[in-house]
């Protein structure tokens, strides 16, 4: 009994997997976007005792194909549900190669070429987002971990106390993190994981455009300092995932500079749009941030998972994350780099995430990527305009990037918030089950909104027209 395949068995399984992937990309543009499936029957498809003996690889592949057909098609051009990966095939091919290499990218010693590729990819992402070219960074699993790591770095940079040794009890005062009222859920979650508590996150008011009030931020920081509290950082949005709002980064960076407070920009969604002609001009101030989170698996169109943290001062990463241990000591000669990723981030084991980004940028080029992002913004603007011109839809928020929040609002229900909320809650699920398009939701004040996120290079205005027609058709059935 062996765990290895023969060359013939490897070829058969490898070809079957590749052929499935090729067929899947052809089928990914066909409905249904969301399968008709229930939890019980799906669980029964995979329910079996622990396999003790090998099963034929062809049968395993066939079972996978059955299960895959019962998943949501995240690459479909009418998958409007979330700010997520639409999946470039170049990245898919790279992920296969990265898994075949199976390199643990902990340090240059463990993976010399993978380490060199990651450093190069970090430089490219600094250029694409407009971040400080002298900064450094590291790839992580996604924006949530990047935001966590950023807050950890900001916390340690806020004091001369050795927090790594003594913990947050060594802080000179109760910590404060300033974020807008629509900050991503990862911000309070990071505060909880860092041991300073969700109460440390101070919500700064936003205007009707959902952008942080920089004047209110300045006042809050000054008041907290006067009260003996300890300002740690400001978390500003470069693309809120509810509406796409971009905070006034130039004004906020000015407040942070005056106050001596770290500025972290959450650009997980909008950071890569900085170079797009149709993007909000506020993104041009990203270069003033002390740290920036990015998600290549959002608007760089990379397959999951791929996140990134960039910092203006790379030494701050080491100050936060360096931890020695005999079993990871780097013993190098003059021809070897002593660089170790474990000194720059929270992970030890790390897969070769940079390869798919490297493939995508090289296979498509930065101009094509930026053009695709710009097209997404244009399609969102056209959807917003179509909603505004309609008699049965209402837009509920500005659409500065590529998210449009709206609701179905027939004339006889206008002014009846409860009825409109109830109708649109039902419509969202019914549209998802219909299979022609997929939308998610957001709360805009007290109004339940359908949320269309356009972050797929395959999406066109024809797809948004089908979305509105689908909602109308489903609504006529629902309201009967």
Image (cartoon, rainbow, N blue to C red):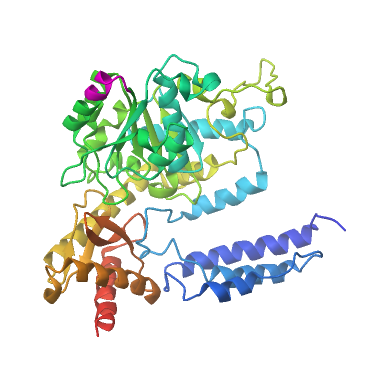
The answer to whether residue 438 is above or below residue 229 is below
- Relative depth, front residue between 309 and 455: 309
Residue 136 in view, yes or no: no
Query: From the viewer's perspective, is 110 left or right of 125?
Result: right
- Give the image location of residue 163, x and y in percent: 49, 21
Question: In which quadrant will I find the C terminus?
Answer: bottom left
Examine the image and state in which quarter residue 290 appears: top left
Residue lying at 33% horizontally and 51% vertically, measured from the top left: 372
- Give the image location of residue 336, x and y in percent: 65, 21
Q: Is residue 160 magenta?
A: no
The answer to whether residue 160 is above or below residue 283 is above
Examine the image and state in which quarter residue 74 appears: bottom left
Residue span colored magenta: 222-229
Secondary structure mostly seen in magenta is helix
- Give the image location of residue 169, x and y in percent: 47, 22
Question: In which quadrant will I find the N terminus?
Answer: bottom right
Query: From the viewer's perspective, is 49 left or right of 208?
Result: right
């Amino acid at each position: 009994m062996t765990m290895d395949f023969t060359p013939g068995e490897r070829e058969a399984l490898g070809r079957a997997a590749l052929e499935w992937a090729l067929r899947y990309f052809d089928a990914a543009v066909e409905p249904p976007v969301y399968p008709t499936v229930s939890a019980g029957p799906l669980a029964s498809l995979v329910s079996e005792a622990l396999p003790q003996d090998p099963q034929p690889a062809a049968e395993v592949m066939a079972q996978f194909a059955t299960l895959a057909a019962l998943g949501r098609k995240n690459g479909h051009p009418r998958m409007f549900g979330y700010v997520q990966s639409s999946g470039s095939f170049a990245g898919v091919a790279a992920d296969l190669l990265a898994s075949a290499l199976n390199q643990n990218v902990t340090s240059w010693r463990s993976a010399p070429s993978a380490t060199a590729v990651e450093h190069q990819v970090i430089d490219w992402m600094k250029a694409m987002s407009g971040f400080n070219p002298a900064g450094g960074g590291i790839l992580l699993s996604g924006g949530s971990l990047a935001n966590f790591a950023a807050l950890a770095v900001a916390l340690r940079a806020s004091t001369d106390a050795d927090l790594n040794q003594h913990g947050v009890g060594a802080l000179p005062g109760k910590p404060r993190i300033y974020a807008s009222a629509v900050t991503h859920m990862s911000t309070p979650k990071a505060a909880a994981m860092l041991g300073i508590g969700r109460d440390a996150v101070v919500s700064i008011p936003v205007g009707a455009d959902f952008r942080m009030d920089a004047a209110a931020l300045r006042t809050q920081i000054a008041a907290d300092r006067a009260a003996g509290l300890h300002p740690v950082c400001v978390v500003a949005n470069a693309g809120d995932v509810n509406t796409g709002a971009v905070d006034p980064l130039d004004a906020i960076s000015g407040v942070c500079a005056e106050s001596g407070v770290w500025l972290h920009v959450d650009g997980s969604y909008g950071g890569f749009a900085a170079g797009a002609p149709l993007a909000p001009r506020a993104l041009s101030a990203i270069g003033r941030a002390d740290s920036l989170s990015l998600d290549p698996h959002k608007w760089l169109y990379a397959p999951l998972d791929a996140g990134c943290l960039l910092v203006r001062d790379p030494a701050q990463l080491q100050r936060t994350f360096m931890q020695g241990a005999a079993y990871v000591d780097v013993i190098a000669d003059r021809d070897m780099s002593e660089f170790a990723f474990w000194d720059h981030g929270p992970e030890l084991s790390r897969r070769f995430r940079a390869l798919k980004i490297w493939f995508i940028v090289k296979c498509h080029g930065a101009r094509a990527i930026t053009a695709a992002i710009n097209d997404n913004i244009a399609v969102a603007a056209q959807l917003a305009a179509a909603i505004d011109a309609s008699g049965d839809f209402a837009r509920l928020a500005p659409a500065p990037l590529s998210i449009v929040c709206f609701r179905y609002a027939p004339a006889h229900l206008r002014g009846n918030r409860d009825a409109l909320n109830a109708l649109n809650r039902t419509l969202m699920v019914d549209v998802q089950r219909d299979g022609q398009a997929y939308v998610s939701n957001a709360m805009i004040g007290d109004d339940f909104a359908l949320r269309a996120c356009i972050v797929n290079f395959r999406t066109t205005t024809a797809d948004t027209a089908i979305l509105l027609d689908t909602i109308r058709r489903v609504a006529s059935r629902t309201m009967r």
